[in-house]
Image (tube, rainbow, N blue to C red):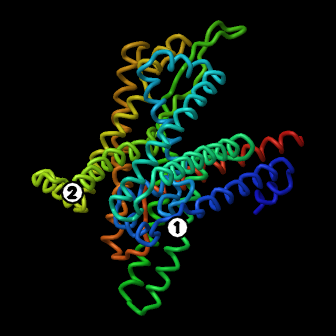
Amino acid sequence: MEKLAKIWEYKDLRKKVLVVIGLLLVTRILAHIPLPGVDLPRLQTFFQQNQAFGLLNMFSGGTISNFSIVLMGVGPYITSSIIFQLLAMIFPKLEELQKEGESGRQKINQYTRITTVPLAFIQAYSMLVLLKSQGIVPAWTPFDLAVMLISVCAGTVLMMWIGEIITEKGIGNGVSLIIMLGILSDFPTQIRNTVALVQSGDTSKLFGVIAFVAVFILVVAAVVFVQEGQRNIPISYAKKLKNSGYGTASSFLPIRVNIAGVIPIIFALSLLVLPTVAARFLEGAYTPWIANAAKTVTELFNNQAFYGALYFLLVFAFTYFYTGIVFKPEQIAENLQKQGGYIPGIRPGTETREYLSRIIVRITLFGAVFLGLIAVLPFIVQTITNIDTLVLGGTGVLIIVSVIIETIRQINSQIVMHTYDIY
């Protein structure tokens, strides 16, 4: 309460918070303005029954299930950002831009924005064709299709712009806050449906709700524990002293348990969606063996045990893959050697690189298992509680907790800055 009072007390901080609240409200209004000609109840049932597309709907902030004018949300922008992160590992020019500081970052951001536009068209068209194949969207004329694609693409650019304004003028990361609000927006409906279920008089459902609340608290605690967890590697630097020659200055290199964040889940989701979409398209093929194979694939991916196991393995593998891209022991060892730094007991150069590689392999094991369990958490919770009205998406909890922690840190830093200015 004291910090809330300070937020309201400092004019510029209060203005930033109000800007964030106002723009987030705009995004929720846009998310409920639907495109015409769709069976909304059938559309929402489709996403509830399909785990992969349900997660895709979550990343869009619920805009897909509402078939709104911002159908794809900030999804294409996130995809574009990931693409350029990966391209920077392949093309030296992009890697050089990353090292140029603020100017290089602005150039890459501009490339990311430009790439978002064609990605929005491609993803929107693919989603519309998929929904049409399921009978959710009626047949369209070329003019209708053009209007829908232009509206959806403009909606994505608008959401991207709002997210960047929040980041620049407000508090926190705008795109992350938009996604978090989209996830939270489904909670009131889930709570209402669960209350109605408990009031029906089924005692087993009441115990299921209690179990759900207990699991939810444990999951939030685990997410905070892992997200904040890090291994501090001691670093010593040679330092010249005024009177006594040379000495050492101590510091540490923090290695987070979950370096990859939520990216491995996005990668795994992308791979899982492809065979599902392809199978649904090919089920109506004229060639019998192709249609039968497509139906087999659909049935296989509808099997929760198979889907959950494959999802876990893909997230586990992509965690190591993405961590290997982001964390480079060779560069860290080289930079330490150039700066006159070393790990006590470890020789600079090759031995430092090998030591850091061993550390990252071990610490990533815990992070990979954790992310895999987070990904398949909805299957586990529904098995334990036997309640369909409450869905505990581990990925959603991970995003919400991470965004809240980061936003609180930024607010605290702003309050400390004002306190420092006063004194």
Q: Nearer the viewer, residue 49 or 326?
A: 49
Say which residue label 2 marks.
283
| Residue 274 to residue 132: above or below | above
Residue 405: % across, % down: 60, 51
Residue 186: mark in rendering: 1
| Residue 271 to residue 398: above or below | above
Q: Which residue is drawn at 13% across and 51% down?
A: 287
Q: Under tag 2, what secondary structure?
A: loop
Q: Which residue is drawn at 30% across and 40% down?
A: 317
In the picture, the quarter occupied by the N terminus is: bottom right
Q: Which residue is drawn at 38% across and 57% down?
A: 53
* 129 left or right, relative to 113: left
* 159 left or right, relative to 42: right
Q: Is residue 73 visible?
A: yes
Q: Residue at x 34, y 36 (%)?
A: 320
Three-letter amino acid code at the position of disc 2: Glu
In this rendering, the label closer to the viewer, 1 or 2: 2
The answer to which quarter of the image holds residue 134 is bottom left
The answer to which quarter of the image holds residue 330 is top left
Three-letter amino acid code at the position of disc 1: Asp
Residue 47: % across, % down: 40, 63
Q: Which of 403 and 176 is in front in this view?
A: 176
Residue 18: % across, % down: 77, 55
* 9 left or right, relative to 49: right
In the picture, the quarter occupied by the C terminus is: top right
Q: Under tag 1, what secondary structure?
A: loop
Neighbourhood count class around disc 2 (C-alpha, 10 Å): few under 14, some 14–19, many 20 upward: some
| Residue 335 to residue 282: above or below | above
